[in-house]
Amino acid sequence: MASPFQRIILDGVPRQGEAILHWSAELAERHHDAPWTRSLGATLRELITGSGALAARTSGTTGPPKPMMIPADDLIASARLTAASFGLKEGDRALLCLPCDFIAGKLMLVRAFVSGLDLQAIDPSGSVLGHLHGDRGFRFAALVPQQLHQAIGEDRARTERIFDTVLLGGGPVSAVLAEALQGLRTRVFHGYGSTETVTHVALRALNGPDAADHFTALGTVRFAVDDRGCLVVHTPHLRTTEHRTNDVVELLDDRRFRWLGRADNVILSGGKKLFPEALEARTAAVVPVPHFFAAMPDERLGQCTVLVLESAPLAPEEEAALLTALERVLTKHERPKRILTLRSFRRTSSGKVVRSLE
């Protein structure tokens, strides 16, 4: 079966078939065959020379990541859902600044094929603004939270001029970033999804008049919870129509939920459930190094909270100052009983921290 992905606009120029691969080769040459250009080129070749299906790895929401194939029909359905949700139309400029090793980057390419977006690709590492020349705007871009936070810190006004709408994914949004987005003219949304759901199936606005603390389903997507309180996603637009997750949520109705955290990270302390991700969203403002919260056995509470820092060991006065700072953002029950340090965290291939005390 011929691939449905044969025409795309790249840097303002419509390209078809082999011309797409020539563009990819020229991009790799200009950037000295950098890894991000190789993964982009491999994804383009996979899309246009095969049946249109893409190889990916599951997100690990229900077990260890494993290989999977996403059929072309699912890719197209996801891209159309995005276009409908954001009002994207042919010729709209879009920015690819995520690696195509992972689903978010792959789907930006798919959206350009399906919706006729005019796509520009830049190095996903370092400063997004630093890789862009001039202030020509983008109608749509998908970023990870750190990229947007850095851009706002470097030049808030230029960020507003360049980006009309930004979709954030790849991790929780800290309270610091959420606060920084208030008053920003760029519309910013946080997406919920996974490789299994072919990227986002729900959104929440982070700024503007529609800002919310809960996610709302897109299209015909519906939600439920299982007996663990974990989200079940119903996706009639995909071949696999039900996806069970390890995300603990507060279900508001079958279209809306508040995300609480991962079931496998929950700390059961004194009969209360503490969600490390929620704590970390608040402590990002006062802990200046990468960190996470974890559980340790406690005779009285069952489990107690510990704070793990990617840092050299702290001097007693440094630890005391940090504990005092934490009092401003955490309740007494949430505060860590101990502070541990590790020289470096283990991370997954996608850069997520492995929550291990070793």
Image (spheres, rainbow, N blue to C red):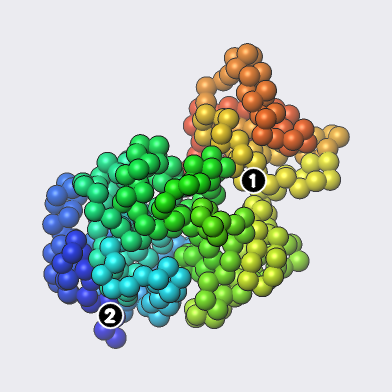
- Give the Cα distance between marks 1 and 2: 43 Å
Residue 294 in the image: above or below residue 18: above
Residue 165, percent from left and from top: 40, 58
Q: Can residue 355 be seen in this view?
A: no
Res 308 quadrant in image: top right
Residue 283 in the image: above or below residue 52: above
User: Mark 1: which amino acid?
Assistant: Ala
User: Mark 2: which amino acid?
Assistant: Ser
The total of numbered circles placed on residues is 2
**Mark positioned earlier in the residue sequence (1 or 2):** 2
Is 312 in front, or is 10? Answer: 10
Q: What element carries label 2?
A: loop
Residue 234, percent from left and from top: 59, 75
Q: Which residue is drawn at the image coordinates 83% and 41% (left, top)?
A: 270
Q: Can residue 332 be seen in this view?
A: yes
Residue 72, percent from left and from top: 37, 78
Residue 26, percent from left and from top: 13, 57
Is 14 in front, or is 234? Answer: 14
Crowding near pointer 2: few (<14 within 10 Å), some, many (20+)? some
Q: Quadrant of the C terminus?
A: top right
Crowding near pointer 1: few (<14 within 10 Å), some, many (20+)? some
Q: In this view, does 309 lie to the left or right of 121?
A: right
Q: Which of marks 1 and 2 is in front?
A: 1
Q: Which residue is drawn at the image coordinates 29% and 86% (left, top)?
A: 1
Q: Mark 1 points at which residue?
A: 278
| Disc on res. 217 | none
Q: Which residue is drawn at the image coordinates 66% and 73% (left, top)?
A: 254
Q: Which residue is drawn at the image coordinates 14% and 49% (left, top)?
A: 30
Q: Are marks 1 and 2 in contact (CB under 8 Å)?
A: no
Q: Mark 2 points at which residue?
A: 3
